Image (cartoon, rainbow, N blue to C red):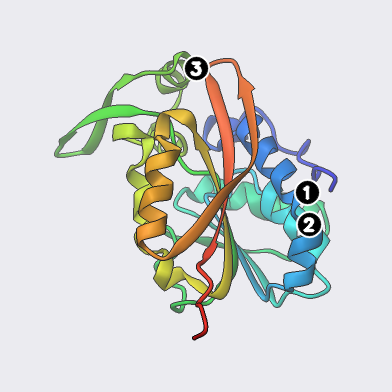
C-alpha cells in the first residue's frame, strides 16, 4: 500500500497541521498488513478521526474504493480539513472531509471501518477562561512543538492525563459508533497503558489485539485492532 502523495503540503501548512510522522506511518503499515482482511470485510462506511494531512484516509480510499460507499475524514482543526481535502484531490481519491469534534454528527452504529491516530502525548494542563493551558509536556519533541505552535496544533498531540483523555472519549462511545461488524484501528504508545485500555474494551464488549509495534526515539508505538466480541450460540 503506497503512501499517498503529500509533497504539495508546505512548511506553512505544518504551522497549523500535524505533519506526517512515525505514528502516521506505523498506522499505514498496520493497515497494509490488514489490507486483504479489510477487502474481504467490504466496509461500506470508512472514517478517520483526526485526519491531519489526510494521507491515511486517502490511502484507504485508494485501496478500498471499489467496494466502499463513502470515505469520511474528520478533524476539529479547519486547517487540517483544508490540507486533507487537497491531499485527496492530489491523489485522485474521493474523501468527504468534515470539520467537527470526533463523530458527533454520524448516525449511531454506522461506521464499518474506523481509524484513529489520537492525541496521545502525556500532558498536564490547567483550565482558565480561555480554555486549557498546557503547562507541562513529558516528551522533549512535544515540548518543542508546544513552544512553536498554536493551540489548534497542540490538540493534535496533547492527550492530557495518561495521554488518554480523547482516546477514552472514543472508547466509551465505541458501541454507539461502530456498526455490528465494525473494525477499529487505534494508535497508542506504551505510556497510554495499553493493557488498561484493553481491559476497558473487554468490559465494554470488545476484543482487541496488537497487530504492530515500533520503537522510535522517545516513543514505543503500537496499533490495536478492535472488534466486537462474537456472540456465542447456545
Tell me how far mark 2 sits from mark 1, CA to CA.
5 Å
Answer above or below: position of 144 versus 163.
above
| Foreground: disc 1 or disc 3 | 1
Check disc 2: other Cα within 10 Å, few if <14, some if 14-19, many if 20+.
some
Identify residue for label 3: 141
Answer above or below: position of 231 versus 2.
below
| Identity of the residue drawn at 55% across and 38% down | 17
Which of pointers 1 and 3 lies earlier in the amino acid sequence?
1
Identify residue for label 1: 32
Check disc 1: other Cα within 10 Å, few if <14, some if 14-19, many if 20+.
some
| Identity of the residue drawn at 74% across and 63% down | 38
The residue most toward the left is 129
Looking at the rendering, which quadrant does residue 42 occupy? Answer: bottom right
Total tally of numbered discs in the picture: 3
Identify residue for label 2: 35
Residue nearest the observer in this picture, 220 or 54: 220
Residue 26, percent from left and from top: 67, 37
Residue 140, percent from left and from top: 45, 13
Answer above or below: position of 84 versus 159.
below
Residue nearest the observer in this picture, 101 or 183: 183
Looking at the rendering, which quadrant does residue 226 occupy? Answer: bottom right
Tell me how far mark 1 sits from mark 3, CA to CA.
27 Å
Kindly check if marks 2 and 3 are in contact, taking CB atoms under 8 A apart as contact: no
Which of pointers 2 and 3 lies earlier in the amino acid sequence?
2
Q: Is residue 72 in view?
A: yes
Residue 105, percent from left and from top: 42, 72
Kindly check if marks 2 and 1 are in contact, taking CB atoms under 8 A apart as contact: yes
**Does dot 2 land on a helix, a strand or a loop?**
helix
Check disc 3: other Cα within 10 Å, few if <14, some if 14-19, many if 20+.
few
Answer above or below: position of 199 versus 67.
above
**Does dot 3 land on a helix, a strand or a loop?**
helix
Amino acid at each position: 500500500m503506497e503512501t499517498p502523495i503529500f509533497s504539495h503540503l508546505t512548511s506553512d501548512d505544518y504551522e497549523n497541521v500535524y505533519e506526517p510522522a512515525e505514528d502516521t506511518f506505523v498506522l499505514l503499515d498496520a493497515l497494509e498488513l490488514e489490507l486483504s482482511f479489510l477487502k474481504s470485510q467490504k466496509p461500506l462506511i470508512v472514517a478517520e478521526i483526526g485526519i491531519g494531512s489526510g494521507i491515511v484516509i486517502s490511502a484507504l480510499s485508494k485501496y478500498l474504493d471499489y467496494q466502499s460507499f463513502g470515505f469520511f475524514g474528520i478533524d476539529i482543526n479547519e486547517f487540517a480539513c483544508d490540507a486533507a481535502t487537497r491531499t485527496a484531490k492530489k491523489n485522485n481519491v474521493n474523501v468527504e472531509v468534515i470539520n467537527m469534534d470526533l463523530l458527533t454528527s454520524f448516525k449511531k452504529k454506522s461506521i464499518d471501518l474506523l481509524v484513529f491516530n489520537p492525541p496521545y502525548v502525556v500532558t498536564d494542563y490547567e483550565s482558565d477562561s480561555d480554555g486549557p493551558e498546557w503547562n507541562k509536556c513529558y516528551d522533549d519533541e512535544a515540548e518543542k512543538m508546544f513552544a512553536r505552535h498554536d493551540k489548534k496544533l497542540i490538540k493534535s498531540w496533547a492527550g492530557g492525563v495518561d495521554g488518554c483523555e480523547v482516546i477514552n472519549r472514543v472508547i466509551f462511545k465505541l458501541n454507539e459508533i461502530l456498526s455490528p461488524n465494525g473494525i477499529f484501528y487505534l494508535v497508542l504508545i506504551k505510556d497510554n497503558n495499553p493493557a488498561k485500555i484493553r481491559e476497558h474494551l473487554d468490559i465494554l464488549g470488545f476484543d482487541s489485539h496488537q497487530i504492530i509495534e515500533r520503537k522510535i526515539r522517545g516513543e514505543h508505538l503500537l496499533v490495536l485492532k478492535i472488534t466486537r466480541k462474537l456472540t456465542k450460540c447456545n
